Image (cartoon, rainbow, N blue to C red):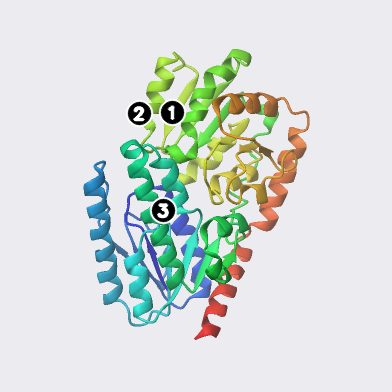
Amino acid sequence: MCVITSTSAARTGEVLLSKLLRVLEPACGKILVITGAFKNEITSEKLNVTRLKTYEDKRTSLKILKFIVSQLKVCWSLLKMRKGIDVVMFYINSGGLTLPIMLSKILNKKVVLIVSASDSGMASIIYKDYLFGVGGRIVVAIYKALEKINWVFADRIMVDSEKIARDYAPDSYRHKAVIANDRRFIDADTFRVKKKLAERRNLVGYIGRLSYEKGVMNLVKAIPLVLKQRADLEFLIGGDGPLLIKLEDEIAKAGLDNKVNFAGWIPHDELANWLNELKLLILPSYTEGLPNIVLEAMACGTPVLVTPVGALPDIIKDKETGFIIEDNTPNRIAENIITTLQYPKLDEIVTKARRFVTEKYTYETAVGRYKAILSQLAGKV
């Protein structure tokens, strides 16, 4: 098995990649990894990690050039280690890695794509105002073309929900899609209820990447609206990303620095403690797959409020295992934060939510899922 990720620097990817490798280890004889800044915490004779220099640049032209160069470096690494590889798996922002995907097929390897969200869908949100909208349409068209090429060359595409498959996959290649939102796992001993809701202070939080598609700017704009009715509340913004300075400026202009804590990047081994401080976790995204933070919050007995995007409606049943927000406008976010915190059966909901994730998202289930998919691929040889 060879696992390839984008080489762009993103610390959230380290946790995701580590979990994937833990799941793959029982299913594979040897695992080769080509990635960027990945701090490997897994000790295994099966594992060999090739780290390539990460690329990050705010200037669009240089960013595109560095991205192309990074793909060529991935291709060269793949060529050098091609012997002994049966399956190449692409993961974490890998939708644009079309050159390595094509090379894998040229080398007669089985190709598996793990897709959490449509890259073209995300681009339509992130770049919608780029060059007065014209540039945004061009970027989206490029991403759509790359997605179609990827589907042609892939043998299997693992997606988190049927909706993602419908939005992402051309009809003629839909048979390659595998709905696999049970491929993730939660460590129920680490992510557990340490503090009951009644013992927590009135803290509402967002934890994740600080980028436009996550809807976090809308959340920050909703905070003054919430505080007009609930002055006793405080807010936590955890994570980093391109919107950090703008978010901090927005809070400073509103004079709410004493009400909002920007915690920065939260290490994964500290995350359960932070989640056990929250009365509510909100994820007002425009687009998602199935974010781990939602599953981890549910395991910690923290109510979650999310938009109905990606695989989230498969997991969050409104007023059963969490709460669905109709849209992510600031007014709607503010209304839903207030009504959710006042809901009379919160304790029942968090109990049901924890039971759901700890029973469905086990390590054994995830390993079984990957073994089944790899076995199917082997049968195609």
Instruction: Kindly identify the residue that appears in the image at 46 percent across and 30 percent down.
Output: 217
Residue 266 can be seen, yes or no:
no
- Give the x, y percent position of residue 10: 37, 48
Side of 374 where 265 appears, left or right: left
Question: Residue beneath label 3, please?
Answer: 14
Q: CA distance from mark 3 to mark 1?
A: 22 Å
Residue type of the residue flagged with mark 3: Glu
Question: Residue beneath label 1, please?
Answer: 262
Q: Which of the two discs, 2 and 1, labels the residue nearer the N terminus?
A: 2
Q: Secondary structure at mark 3?
A: helix
Quick one: which residue is furthest to the front in this view? Answer: 134
Instruction: Kindly identify the residue that appears in the image at 55 percent across and 45 percent down.
Output: 293
In the image, residue 158 sits, relative to residue 274, either above or below, namely: below
Instruction: Kindly identify the residue that appears in the image at 73 percent across and 33 percent down.
Output: 346
Quadrant of the frame with the N terminus: bottom left
- Give the x, y percent position of residue 261: 46, 25
